[in-house]
């Protein structure tokens, strides 16, 4: 597998850190090893003073002291700096190996210069000291195996040679034992060195994993910008500072205009690169003390700190800054040979505001951003107190929906679908909210809030279960098809297929009578996953129709790959079909296309005999609209099942 540049850099960094820690370990143990050298060399020289030439002892001892001093000074210099670069670490590692080499050579010369041939007891002392120094080197030098191996070989090989030169049985035996001892301590040093390396590797891998987890928890993976969690944390700190020092800050909430069109037409890869380019421009524009974060999708937020001591100064400052942010989008973005033109809608709010917490401020900036979008996009809007009503309404809707699910305020109405003779062939389940104060509320007033808050999952389950249960209980003398709308968010939920199966089985409803109506927006997001999910549901017996066909962005290339049986012409084309030539051409085109693809078509919003006549003339076979039936509660549905004259 070919590693990418980032992975190679991380591996190189880990190796550098491990090498640096190995070097630190050998220097960390140096004071004790140097002290042991001074003590052992001094005692050995003192004891051998009686049997070895004095000048030889003095010369050897001075060399040991000088080498020890050199190693100590190297140790002191190492403590005064923190090597970070590869070349610096290699330099100090080589100095440590050099010091070990000099010490090993001196202890090796002790076997040659200080070995009393006629005094066995003194020989034993010398051998004991050299063996002890070798054992100590295993623990103090093994973090860098080259240092320990060099020290051990230079120390022990002369001793082995000395034993061999005795030319006696005892000497030969000592030679063999010396060789075995050398092999053993070097092997032990090797194992310890490997153990240290593995331990350091595990530690750094764990540390890197922890750092990765922390980073991923606080930064956006795509743009490397702070994510919502980190932004909220910094905003919270800045609110406290602003209150303490009595200055103002600001939040800018950016949403890219028509980004979805780029994503849909050029693919998510191009969209991702574009988001990275946007992030880079924003990052380069802000001050060091400011923060730009990505909340998700095409939404970015900027935290500006200390922009004025009064609201007027802060407002003027941030207004100019918002204009500069929008100027960042005047230059096109070049992405994979595509020249992309982009703009942004910006919502602005100032802080501190009495009692406003970070989430409140974000919501205010979000509301202001949506106002900028509603007023034409590519502009900025300040949050005004008058906008707060929109926030309150949204919160009230959310709170009311939660209550409605528990209190049974949601209801289903059914609108018939008929064939060309007026005979009922199906019914569409339509959700209504029977509000205790406002009466019946249509879905267009609350579905968006349900999707934003995640309540759509519970609502969607309730709609499907209630509709299946109603149809199963009625028990028509002939089967009709039940059409149920499925929201994009609900359809993309991971366990959607399993939940649908459980609901159908629990209601004892025949899935062959169930049709899901999905919008074109469902199709274009993660197309492969959509097709797979539709195929799974089709195996259960469920059929599909595309709702509001002609208003989205689907293409024929997508359409022919989908397990779809029916297209539903949007009411916006049907409403003026008898008076608007453009609508008439669109409807006729859809009917011709569906006919060639073997798809059924139902026209919704049929309200006049003229529209019905036109559709029949052009070959439309199925209809839905007020001309045949308004949406009615379940208890009124039975009377409308018989053929309906139009």
Image (tube, grey):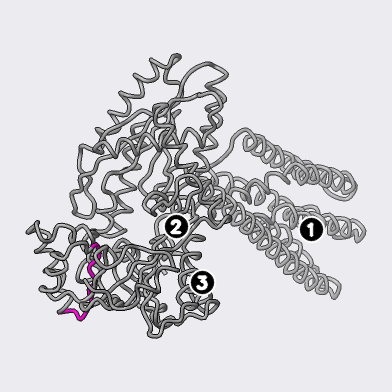
Mark nearer the N terminus (1 vs 3): 1
2 or 3: mark nearer the eye = 3
Is 36 situated left or right of 220 in this image?
right
Q: Secondary structure at mark 2?
A: helix
Mark nearer the N terminus (2 vs 1): 2
Image quarter hosting the N terminus: bottom left
Image quarter hosting the C terminus: bottom left
Residue 119 image position (x, y, % from top left):
90, 58
Instruction: Determine the residue positioned at 40% across, 77% down.
Output: 514
Q: Is residue 306 above or below residue 606?
A: above
Q: Nearer the viewer, residue 485 or 558?
A: 485
Tags 2 and 1 touching, CB below 8 Å = no
Residue labelled with disc 2: 8
Q: Secondary structure at mark 3?
A: helix
What whole-number distance in Å separates the C-alpha atoms at marks 2 and 3? 44 Å
What whole-number distance in Å separates the C-alpha atoms at marks 2 and 1? 38 Å
What residue range appears in magenta? 596-605
Tags 2 and 3 touching, CB below 8 Å = no
Q: Is residue 479 above or below residue 634?
A: below
Residue labelled with disc 3: 499
Q: Nearer the viewer, residue 92 or 309?
A: 309
Q: Which mark is residue 135?
A: 1
Residue 500 image position (x, y, % from top left):
48, 73
């Amino acid at each position: 597998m070919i590693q990418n540049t980032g992975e190679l850099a991380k591996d190189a960094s880990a190796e550098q850190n491990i090498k640096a820690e190995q070097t630190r370990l050998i220097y960390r143990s140096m004071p004790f090893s140097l002290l042991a050298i001074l003590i052992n060399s001094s005692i050995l020289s003192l004891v051998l003073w009686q049997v070895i030439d004095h000048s030889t002892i003095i010369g050897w001892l001075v060399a040991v002291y000088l080498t020890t001093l050199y190693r100590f000074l190297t140790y002191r210099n190492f403590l005064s700096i923190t090597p970070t670069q590869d070349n610096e670490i290699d330099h100090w590692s080589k100095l440590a190996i050099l010091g070990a080499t000099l010490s090993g050579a001196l202890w090796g010369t002790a076997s040659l210069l200080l070995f009393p041939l006629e005094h066995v007891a003194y020989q034993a002392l010398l051998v004991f000291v050299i063996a002890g120094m070798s054992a100590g080197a295993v623990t103090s030098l093994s973090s860098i195996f080259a240092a320990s191996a060099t020290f051990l070989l230079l120390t022990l090989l002369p001793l082995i040679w000395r034993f061999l030169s005795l030319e006696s049985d005892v000497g030969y035996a000592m030679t063999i034992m010396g060789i075995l001892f050398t092999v053993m301590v070097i092997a032990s040093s090797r194992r310890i060195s490997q153990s240290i390396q593995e331990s350091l590797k595990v530690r750094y891998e764990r540390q890197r994993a922890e750092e990765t987890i922390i980073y991923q928890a606080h930064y956006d993976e795509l743009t490397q910008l702070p994510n919502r969690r980190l932004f909220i944390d910094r905003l919270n700190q800045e609110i406290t500072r602003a209150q303490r020092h009595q200055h103002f800050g600001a939040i800018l909430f950016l949403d890219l205009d028509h980004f979805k069109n780029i994503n849909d037409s050029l693919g998510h890869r191009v969209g991702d690169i574009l988001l990275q380019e946007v992030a880079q421009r924003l990052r380069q524009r802000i001050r060091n003390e400011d923060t730009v974060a990505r909340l998700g999708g095409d939404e970015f937020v900027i935290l500006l700190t200390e922009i004025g001591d009064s609201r007027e100064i802060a407002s003027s400052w941030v207004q100019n800054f918002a204009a500069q942010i929008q100027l960042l989008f005047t230059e096109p973005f070049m992405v994979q040979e595509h020249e992309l033109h982009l703009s942004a809608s910006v919502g602005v709010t100032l802080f501190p505001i009495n009692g406003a917490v970070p989430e409140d401020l974000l919501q205010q900036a979000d509301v202001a951003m949506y106002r900028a979008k509603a007023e034409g996009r590519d502009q900025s809007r300040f949050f005004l107190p008058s906008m707060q009503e929109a926030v309150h309404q949204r919160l009230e809707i959310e709170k009311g929906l939660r209550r409605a699910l528990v209190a049974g305020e949601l209801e289903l109405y059914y609108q018939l679908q008929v064939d060309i003779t007026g005979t009922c062939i199906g019914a569409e389940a339509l959700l209504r909210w029977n509000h205790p104060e406002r009466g019946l509320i249509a879905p267009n007033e609350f579905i968006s809030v349900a999707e934003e808050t995640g309540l759509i999952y519970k609502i969607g389950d309730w709609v499907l279960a209630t509709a299946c249960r109603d149809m199963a209980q009625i028990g028509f003398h002939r089967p009709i098809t039940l059409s149920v709308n499925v929201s994009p968010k609900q359809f993309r939920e991971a366990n959607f297929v399993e939940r649908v199966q459980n609901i159908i089985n629990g209601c004892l409803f025949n899935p062959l009578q169930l049709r899901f109506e999905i919008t074109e927006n469902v199709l274009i997001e993660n197309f492969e996953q959509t097709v797979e999910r539709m195929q799974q549901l089709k195996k259960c017996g469920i059929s599909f129709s595309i709702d509001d066909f002609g208003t989205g962005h689907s293409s024929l290339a997508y359409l022919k790959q989908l397990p779809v049986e029916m297209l539903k012409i949007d009411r916006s084309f049907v409403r003026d079909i008898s008076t608007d030539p453009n609508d008439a051409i669109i409807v006729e085109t859809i009917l011709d296309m569906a006919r060639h693809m073997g798809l059924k078509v139902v026209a919704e919003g049929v309200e006049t005999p003229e529209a019905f006549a036109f559709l029949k003339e052009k070959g439309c076979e199925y209809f839905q609209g007020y001309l045949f039936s308004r949406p009615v509660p379940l208890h009124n549905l039975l009377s409308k099942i018989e053929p309906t004259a139009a």
